[in-house]
Image (cartoon, rainbow, N blue to C red):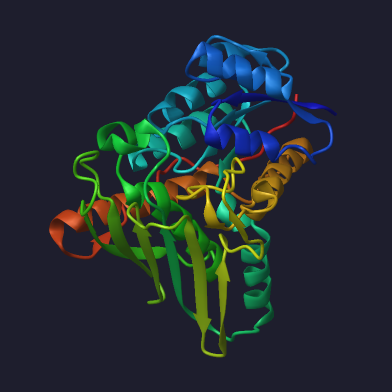
Amino acid sequence: MTVGIGMLGSGFIGEFHTLGLRYVPDARVVANWGAGTERREAFAARFGSRALDSIEAVCADPEVDLVVVSLPNHLHVEAVRAAARNRKAVACTKPLGRNAAEAREMLELVTNAGVFHAYLENVVFNAETIRMHEMIESGAIGVVTTFRAREGHSGPHAAHFWDAELAGGGALLDMASHGAEAARYLFGKDVGVRDVFAWGDTLVHGDRTAGEDNAVMLVRFEDGRVATMDVSWSSKGGLENRLEVYGDGGRIVQDISSTVLRAFIERPAGYLGEKVDADTGWVYPVPNETYVHGHDAMMAEVVGAFREGRPPRETFADGLVVNQILDAAYRSMKSGHWESLVAAPATPATATGTPR
């Protein structure tokens, strides 16, 4: 069966999600919406879809089977409400909500509507992270003890990220959401999170944001193991994205943003990679960035799970846990103490749904 995708968002992440569908058989974007008529029409022309004039129009479109929410954080709830109202399967980019209350509402909306739902966290779908997981499962590094994630760049590419109230937070919400779910994936989701400790401050970009532009978060699991997320919006020189996992019998380290391709150029060559700070001199272009960052495998899993009527690897329930971790981190920034997670909702989660 052909799966018609309704793409909400015509910007950076919407393009990544759409490109991630390129190798998925019989799946294509049939309708799209995004802020600005010119931008959404350009998106439609590029990808062969129909540009519609509202979130509701995309969610109500009869050709749309699966709605993909690739919008700024403050529009996630509105988009999921529209998808659930129209009984459409829905996948939403990270973070699921600006806070756990929004994430909880979204989980309850899709659960009550009985529709398929997927959480779009690409880092756990890149080939290196999956291989790390396989090696851990094989016992290659013994018992996993600690995990560390480092993500940094010189600042967000879009204005809505800099508005802490609109976005729901700063660098921590934006980037530690990746590390939190990677830690859960590599430690094992059967182990719950006990509490969180965090520091964050606005060290560089006080003229642009009231949110933290640097932060460190410690996530302590129920068995005592700790995962560390270190994030920055003031790291010059391009995207940093490293994951390290340590066991009593070894360690595994990956650098998602590393590339074997390098060039010295005197003239700009166009797009080189996410958050690149320089377009001349020594540059490090990222070949096939959609694949490298996990979007190909993520979108294939989402569409495949929807077709088969099974839960995908990542659901809104996972997104809620990540938001609960981040909420605890923001409380810890204020209190200076370890903060426990707020209890999960009583409503049982389901991600299954029968394709129309």
Residue that appears at 21% across and 54% down? 203
Q: Residue furthest left?
A: 335
Q: Is residue 5 visible?
A: yes
Q: Quadrant of residue 214?
A: bottom left
- Judge left or right: residue 144 versus residue 97: right
124 to 10, vertically: above or below: below
238 to 66, vertically: above or below: below
Q: Position of residue 270 (x, y in %)?
A: 60, 40
Q: Quadrant of residue 354?
A: top right
Front residue (pair 176, 46):
46
- Judge left or right: residue 215 versus residue 21: left
Residue that appears at 51% across and 19% down? 82
Quarter of the picture containing the N terminus is top right
Front residue (pair 149, 344):
149
104 to 58, vertically: above or below: below
Front residue (pair 100, 48):
48
